[in-house]
Image (cartoon, rainbow, N blue to C red):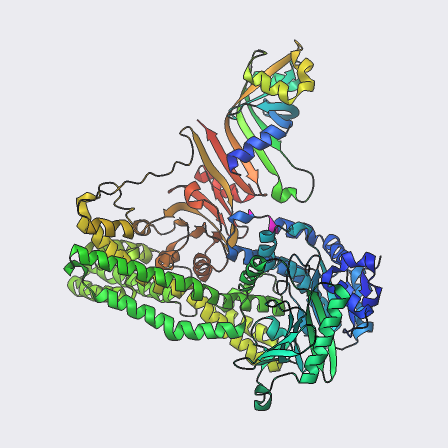
Amino acid sequence: MNLESRLKRLFRFQKLGVLATQQERTPYTSLVAFASSDDMRHIVFATPKATRKFANIRSNANVAMFVDNRSNRAVDFRTAIGVTALGSVRQIPKRKNSSLMKHYCTKHPQLASFLASPSCAFMCIDVRSFLIVERFQNVTEIHLG
Amino acid sequence: MKTILRLSEIDETAKSLVGGKAAALAEMAAGDLRVPRALCLATDFFDRFLDMTGLRDEIFMEYHRKRFEDMRWEEIWDLSLRIKNMFLHTPLPSELSHQLRPRIDRTFRNRPVVVRSSAIGEDSAQFSFAGIHESYVNVRGTDTILKHIKLVWASLFSDAAILYRNETGLDINASKMAVIVQEFINGQKSGVAFSRSPTSEAHMMIEAVHGLNQGLVDGIVEPDRWLIGRRDGRIWSYTPPVTRKSIQADSEGITPSELSQELAERAPLTDREIQGIYRLSRSVERLFGPPQDTEWTYAKRTLYCLQSRPVTTAAVDGDSQRQWYLSLKRNMENLMELRDEIEGHLIPEMQNIAREMEALDLSDLTCQELADELAKRQATFDHWRDIYWEKFIPFAHGVRLFGETYNRQVMPEDPYEFTQLLVATNMQSLERNKMLAGLATFYTTRVMTAAKGSGGETEATAEFDRMLDDFLKTFRNPLWGLDSGPKHRDSIIKLLKQMGDRQPTRPATAHSRKRLERRFLASFPEAEAPHARKLLDLARVSYKLRDDDNIYLGKIEGQMTAALDESKRRLGNRLPVAYQTLNAEEAILLLKNPRLKPSGTAKRQFRGKDVTVTPRQLLGQPAGSGLAAGTARIIEKPEDVFAFTAGEIIVCDAIDPNMTFIIPIAAAVVERRGGMLIHGAIIAREYGLPCVTGVPDAVDLIKNGQHIVVDGYLGIVTVSRDESEEATADTA
């Protein structure tokens, strides 16, 4: 399986990722349910607007999201893959027939009512690049033009 | 349940934990067949050793360092060597040691033993691991036995075992190894009995040799062979060997031994003994059901059954696969024969052929003659490339044999320490590099100084030209640009200026080599020292040839390339696009058919236009220790060599021995091809340069001019976005 396929497979199967935001040089991380577009250029997640991460995003749209498949066993050192997606995030409208909304709701059907809440924002990371770590120390970057 | 069992303690429940070989021995002992006294370490003992020491996780990390499909067989051998070293350096935890030591002491006292593998599924009707895992014969003393138990466990990860499991779909991670420690029976005649002949259902077959049967099992001693009626025990045919040889017990281990003239002329078995083995073989088959392959030995007049397994029903295919993997292991005798053939016949013949081709002036030939000459040279090169695979590569196993012996005897922390004993054996490439260094010094100190006005410019230039001609005569190889044409002369002078500006690092000192040599030889009993010296000598020749053979083959390839270049020159403007990629077959066609048009070749795109994949950290194998930062220089074709600037880092698919002359002025080496014994690694270690090998897609992913950091300790290449990152690259 090539790198691109491994990456897509990881993003299709993993439900949660760690979102890193910042506010005046103070970093902050949160666990979020995410989905990605078929071409991997967009990652969407939902967040209540009253959260620290939402406030951070409003102040600085540059974010990172870390997605991995570790199992907390020794085999992780060789078999786990960890991916950092770098990009900027924006709030997008909740259109039921948009493909990003469909992706999110198909992957997380239990979160449909959460997403539908007026206090919840639907966010989209426009990915600039991926940093992929495999087999403990093998690191590759993919830059999206 | 017990994890250390006598044969009489192996019941139905224990059978699944002791492997097929031990279970069969237990059954034969219970069936009143004479088998040597034995202790069996069940797989639980192996599991506890791995878990208590943390070795299981270490092995797993090492095993998955690189994707299996990306590994070459040399890398698999390296992997196996590193894992074996882990076993040797991991002491038996005291809890296990307290259980095992008294049992060994009580059972065997100070008598010699055989330490045999008994892996789960090893001797089944579906798979035959015969010869794949290790057994050690004539081992004495509890400490030595414990060491050999670990070596047998480690053989679960031998290269042949890894490859065979992969091929047959067995999961290496689930593989388990039980071990049999068995009293050593010093038999005077030994062999194998097939209760049903592999070639005839109505017969059984007995193979016998004088002495021990290890030579027969390993295929280095040809046996006497009898075909016997299965029903009546009548001898149907007898085939003596061409020559009789023997393997005998030494003070420790076993050794090939000359037979007395009387024994060399006499079949090992009498008719009465043949009948004894016939009855044994029939009894073993009655006990187990399916036809059996039984190893036996006669000690004085007593017949012992050493082990028995079903005759493998896995078709010939399975067995031929196993045979191929077994062929990766070469014994000393076989390597000595190869050495004689290579040094005595093959190399002189290669040199003669290259000289003959060189003497022919290609410009005198017509197009038709040139096409024929090119076809002939291509065929000659193909022929010698085949010989290279058949003879030269197997001979490289001399280094492996030595490496494995060195690690077993000396148990060094660094599993590649043995290579220090092999370097500086006057390799052709080192000689060439030395001559080039002399030329560089002369050019920069004499010719350039004279040109600046110190006088004697004409004399210095003439002397330099003479030296350069000598050099080219010795190492002429148009393939890598070392030709005498004016263009190449300029390129060589540019290179010499680079070399003159920078003194290369010198390799390991003779002093440390001597120290290691003494340490290695002292690890053997005095009687075995000559054998150890012979092995070291063989390994040195093997190591040297690993580099030189490519130079000899390179000379033939160079002559093929010269004919191809002449063809390209003749074809001239008929080759607008595909000039560089034209191969010999196309050139021959075009030379013979003046009206034929060549077709262009398209370069494969790696990815879409707007997506770029760039490496950040690439994981390979540490092959030369050290840390270096510098500019990457991708070497893909001969011209790239001459664009090289001192202090750059060589990044290439595989270091060709014909281009190693730039290594002394390089800062480090990165190579796609993996393995510790490949040319790049050999030469980089020789010059003390950081080297990382086995980096998949290195040439595609790293770009010319990029700043990279080569970590030769960990086997990591970090690609910096800018130079400021280099300082922190090792902590990324």
Q: Quadrant of residue A78?
A: top right
What residue span does the magenta drawing correspond to?
B63-67
Looking at the image, is B656 positioned above or below residue A94? below
> Which corner quadrant holds the C terminus of chain A?
top left
Looking at the image, is B266 positioned above or below residue B541? below
Q: Nearer the viewer, residue B527 or A89?
A: B527
Residue A25 left/right relative to B565? right
Q: Nearer the viewer, residue B53 or B239?
A: B239
x 25%, y 57%: residue: B374
Residue B274 left/right relative to B668? right
How many labels were placed on the picture?
0
x 52%, y 31%: residue: A130
Q: Quadrant of residue B440?
A: bottom left
Point out residue B728 in the picture as x, y percentages from the top left corner: 52, 41
Q: Going by the picture, which residue comes out furthest to the bottom?
A: B262
Residue B460 left/right relative to B508? left
Q: Quadrant of residue B24?
A: bottom right
x 40%, y 45%: residue: B631
Point out residue B404 in the picture as x, y percentages from the top left corner: 58, 66
Residue B141 left/right relative to A120? right
Is residue B284 visible in the rendered structure shown here? yes
Q: Nearer the viewer, residue A45 or B241?
A: B241
Is residue A45 visible in the rendered structure shown here? no
Point out residue B371 in the picture as x, y percentages from the top left corner: 22, 56
The overriding secondary structure of the stretch rendered in magenta is loop
Residue B638 in the magenta stretch? The answer is no
Point out residue B303 in the picture as x, y percentages from the top left corner: 73, 79
